[in-house]
Image: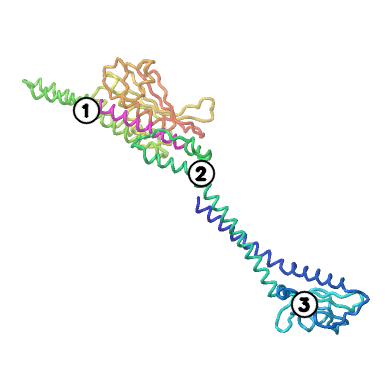
Amino acid sequence: MILMLGATIVLGWIVAFAVLFAYLAHNKASIWDDKLKVIATRILLTIPADKDMVVTGPGLQLRDPALAESEQLVFQVWIDRKRLSVRTPGAPESPLRPGFEDGITTTVIEGRRWRVYSVSDSKGRIYVQVGNLHSVVDAEMQRQALTGLVLSTILLLIVGALMWLVVRSSLKPVVALEAAMRSRRRFDLTPLSSAALPRELHPLVASFNRLLEQLSESIEGERRFIGDAAHELRTPLAALQAQAQIALRANTAADKDVALTKLLRVAQSSSRLSEQLLDLARLNASANAPQHMRADLSDLILHVTRDFDTHALQQERSILLDIRKCTINCNIDEMGILLRNLIDNALRYTPKGGRVRVSCGHEPAVGQEETHRVYLEVADDGPGVPLSERKAIFERFHRAAGTSTRGSGIGLSLVAGIAQLHHATIETGDGLEGRGFAIRVVFPAAAAPPPSTSSQNL
């Protein structure tokens, strides 16, 4: 800021000097011409009309002879264009304007340039010529330009010094704020005080405080996540150790098989928990840099459900598809995580012989029949979720009460986070044939009408 203000002052000084020089150069001639005209006229008017101007001898002597050399302006009084009646010391003996025409002109006499004004009486008998050397005019202009330059330089230096003091005084609170920030302990994210700062900086400090608040919330969320994850991992790891010890101490092959079967289940649960924790960490890392592209939701469903076919058959459950071609703007990796968690959650809480239906399509936007929203729904015919629990199940590490199947409590929180990143809403309801549970993810409305639909059931 100080450099910019200094550059502005220097630029102003250059402009001021250029304007002053142009003004003096443009007006020097007219100023001196007016002076010569006034002097010549006044001299002519002081000459008596009934007297002959005859040179009778040398002029009077000044008490201070130096005064005679203090001014280079000269004049001549001519009678009948022939006789030089009066002239100032230093004036040439020849006419300043040989033609004796009235008016202003420039002449060269004895190698020197003169600016001359000539005026005569009404009878054309007496002529007064007043002149000044061009060198004197130029020197006067240079003196005036130098005086103006010195004065403007002094004034601009004073202004610059005052501006520097004002800027330095105004920025003292900013420097103090910077020193306070440097002296803070690590992860000290308390808001900054703007009481001592200029009002112009209050919006900046307020926005910085909002950023600190968001960072504090993010760090606190990560701390909670790490603590919860450590707590959740402690249980399956302890179970793995316990089942391994039981298998080692088993006396019969049957007891060893039972222990190993339980060990496998715990290992599978731990693997699923680790995958969800990694998905959650990946989602949090990419929340600020989404890479969305157009994709067909039905293709994504087909791709994800193929991965669950074998798993569903082993658990004696079936997956039904009711999909229609519909395009959404999404992050494909995140949509894959959302679909996997919805299907896995439905299969996990559906009993043997149960069904899980995955569907997608278009539905009219509320109050806007000309626009349509894309929806994705996963429904099952399991035990369902009580109304009081349907909102809480989307919170991290929350498990619905009364369920026999133990989940990680992360899957549906991932679904909620991904839906929020895609500006989608989540709706819950009853599942298949009035039983079970259904989760519907509704994406923003599109202005184009839905394409022709075709149903596919597997």
Residue segment shown in magenta: 207-231
In front: label 3 or label 2: 3
**Image-quadrant location for residue 115:** bottom right
User: On screen, 289 above or below 410?
Assistant: below
Q: Residues within 10 Å of mark 1 (few under 14, many from 20)?
A: few
Residue placed most toward the observer, 171 or 230: 171
In front: label 3 or label 1: 3
Label 3 vs label 1: CA separation? 127 Å
Query: Mark 1 belongs to which amino acid?
Result: Gln
Spot occupied by residue 424 in the image (x, y as percentages of width and height):
43, 30
In the picture, measured across the screen, residue 140 lies left or right of residue 74, that is: left
Query: Mark 2 belongs to which amino acid?
Result: Ser
Residue placed most toward the observer, 353 or 95: 95
User: On screen, 233 above or below 437?
Assistant: below
Look at the numbered discs 1 and 2 and tell me whether their residues touch, using CB distance below 8 Å. Answer: no
Q: What residue is disc 3 on? A: 61
For mark 3, give the secondary structure: loop
Q: Residues within 10 Å of mark 2 (few under 14, many from 20)?
A: some
Residue placed most toward the observer, 137 or 323: 137
Spot occupied by residue 427 in the image (x, y as percentages of width and height):
42, 23
* N-term mark: 1 or 2: 2
**Image-quadrant location for residue 226:** top left
Q: What residue is disc 2 on? A: 170
Q: What residue is disc 1 on? A: 268
Query: Mark 3 belongs to which amino acid?
Result: Gln
Q: Is residue 103 magenta?
A: no
Look at the numbered discs 3 and 1 and tell me whether their residues touch, using CB distance below 8 Å. Answer: no
Report the residue at 43% width, 41% height from top: 176
Label the magenta part by its dominant secondary structure. helix
Report the residue at 33% width, 18% height from top: 381
For mark 2, give the secondary structure: helix
